[in-house]
Amino acid sequence: MYKTSIDQAPMFDSDLPGAEGVGFGLLISVKDGAPNFVMERHVIAPGGHGAPHAHDWEQQMYVTAGHGVLVVDGEEHPLRPGDAVLIEAGEGHSFRNEADEPLQMLSFVPRGPGTAWQEQME
C-alpha cells in the first residue's frame, strides 16, 4: 500500500513546444509500487494552454478544480470540476484555461513510452 498527498507531488513545467503555463506533478508511479499505471497532477494557469499533441496510448483525465476547454481533433469540450474524460489513443488533443483560477486535473496513463520521463527521475 502506498499513500501520498496531491500537495506533496513535485511539480515540473511542460517541455512540449507551444505549451504555456502548464505544470505536471507525479503522484504515483512505478517507484511507488504501481507497475501498470501512472497518476499525474496537471495544473494549467489562468490563460495557459497545453500544446496540441497525440500519443499511442489512452489517457484518462479527471477535473478537480477550475474550468477550461478540452480540444479533441478540433472540437471544443467545456470542462468543470467533476468531469471525467477518456482520450483515446491517437486522438489529437490539448487543454486550455480561460478562467481566472488554475485548471487542475488528475491524469491516468498506462506505464510505457509516455511515462519514460518519470522513470528517469527515479
Image (cartoon, helix red, strand yellow):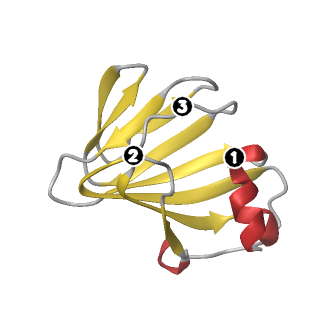
Q: Name, please, the residue furthest toward the bottom.
A: 8
- As measured in the structure, the alpha-carbon distance from the residue carrying label 2 to the one carrying label 1 is 18 Å
Q: Amino acid at mark 2?
A: Gly
Mark 1 residue type: Gly
Answer whether residue 71 is visible to the viewer in this image. Answer: yes
Q: Residues within 10 Å of mark 1 (few under 14, many from 20)?
A: few
Residue under circle 2? 18
Mark closest to the chain's N terminus, 3 or 2: 2
Sequence-earlier tag: 3 or 1: 3
Q: Nearer the viewer, residue 41 or 82?
A: 41
- Determine which residue is flagged by label 3: 86
* Residue toward you, 67 or 97: 97
Q: Which mark is residue 114?
A: 1
Asked whether, in this view, residue 28 is left or right of residue 101, the answer is right
Q: Residue at x 14, y 57 (%)?
A: 100
Of the residues tagged 3 and 1, which is closer to the observer? Answer: 1
What crowding class fits label 3: few (fewer than 14 Cα within 10 Å), some (14-19), or many (20 or more)?
few
Q: CA distance from mark 3 to mark 2?
A: 23 Å
Residue 29 in sight from this viewpoint = no
Tags 3 and 1 in contact by the CB under 8 Å rule?
no
Of badges 2 and 1, nearer the viewer stands 2
In what quadrant of the picture does the N terminus appear?
bottom right
| Secondary structure beneath label 1 | helix
Q: Name the residue at 54% across, 31% down.
A: 86
User: Dividing the image into 4 quarters, which one contains the C terminus?
Assistant: bottom right
